[in-house]
């Protein structure tokens, strides 16, 4: 009788595990190294490169004031220029996120000339929730992709990777 119970419990456990719809947001990536991220704001296209080869491309949403470079805190703009991916947030309010090293010294000096803060906390991130996608250009200056896409980006792009943001 005990053997039958044990076999039943093993079968039940395997059945529940096979039917589970829960998947981890943390993916593994074993492909070519991402050596550069290129963001083309006007075209709303983000590319992951290995050398000169495009590995992946994504559409995205920007800040609520998408034209022009970020200059000041609260301007709703996304930076333009060369930066680095410099941090990761596995507990982001936007599923997952990877940070962009804005502001740099030039950004800080420009804002200081006007007695303003350059702002910060610029990320590539997912959506607010599965059900609230945010609409068009809804961020405060970040780059928003779908949750599935940020899972790929989070797995593929390492800290220290160059990111070029173009108008």
Image (tube, grey):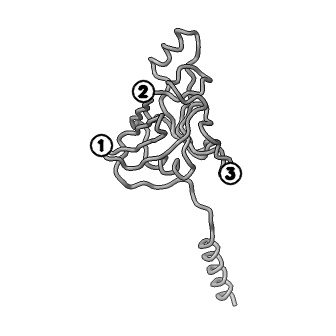
Vertical comparison of 112 with 88: above or below: above
Q: Which residue is mark 1?
A: 52
Q: Residue at x 62, y 65 (%)?
A: 21
User: Which labelled disc corresponds to residue 131?
Assistant: 3
Q: Residue at x 58, y 60 (%)?
A: 23
Q: Position of residue 103 (x, y in %)?
A: 50, 23
Q: Position of residue 123 (x, y in %)?
A: 54, 36
Q: Residue at x 58, y 17 (%)?
A: 117
Name the foreground residue: 118 vs 40: 40
Which quadrant of the view contains residue 39?
Answer: top left
User: Which labelled disc corresponds to residue 106?
Assistant: none
User: Which labelled disc corresponds to residue 81?
Assistant: 2
Q: Earlier in the sequence, mark 3 or mark 2?
A: 2
Q: CA distance from mark 1 to mark 3?
A: 36 Å
Label 3 CA crowd tier, 10 Å (few <14, some 14–19, many 20+): few
Q: CA distance from mark 2 to mark 1?
A: 19 Å
Q: CA distance from mark 3 to mark 2?
A: 33 Å
Q: Quadrant of the C terminus?
A: top left
Q: Secondary structure at mark 2?
A: strand
């Amino acid at each position: 009788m005990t053997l039958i119970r044990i076999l039943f419990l093993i079968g039940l456990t395997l059945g529940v595990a096979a039917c589970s719809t829960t998947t981890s947001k943390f993916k593994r990536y074993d492909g070519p190294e991402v050596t550069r991220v290129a963001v083309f704001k006007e075209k709303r296209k983000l590319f992951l490169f290995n050398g000169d080869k495009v590995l992946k491309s994504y559409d995205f949403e920007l800040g609520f004031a998408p034209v022009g470079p970020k200059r000041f805190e609260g301007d709703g703009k996304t930076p333009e220029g060369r930066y680095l991916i410099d941090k990761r947030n596995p507990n982001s309010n936007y599923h997952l996120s990877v940070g962009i090293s804005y502001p740099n010294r030039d950004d800080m000096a420009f804002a200081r000339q006007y007695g303003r803060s350059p702002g910060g906390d610029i990320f590539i991130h997912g959506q607010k929730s599965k059900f609230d996608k945010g609409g068009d250009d809804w961020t405060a200056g970040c780059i928003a992709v779908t949750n599935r896409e940020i899972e790929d980006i989070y797995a593929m792009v390492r800290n220290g990777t160059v990111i070029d943001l173009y108008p």
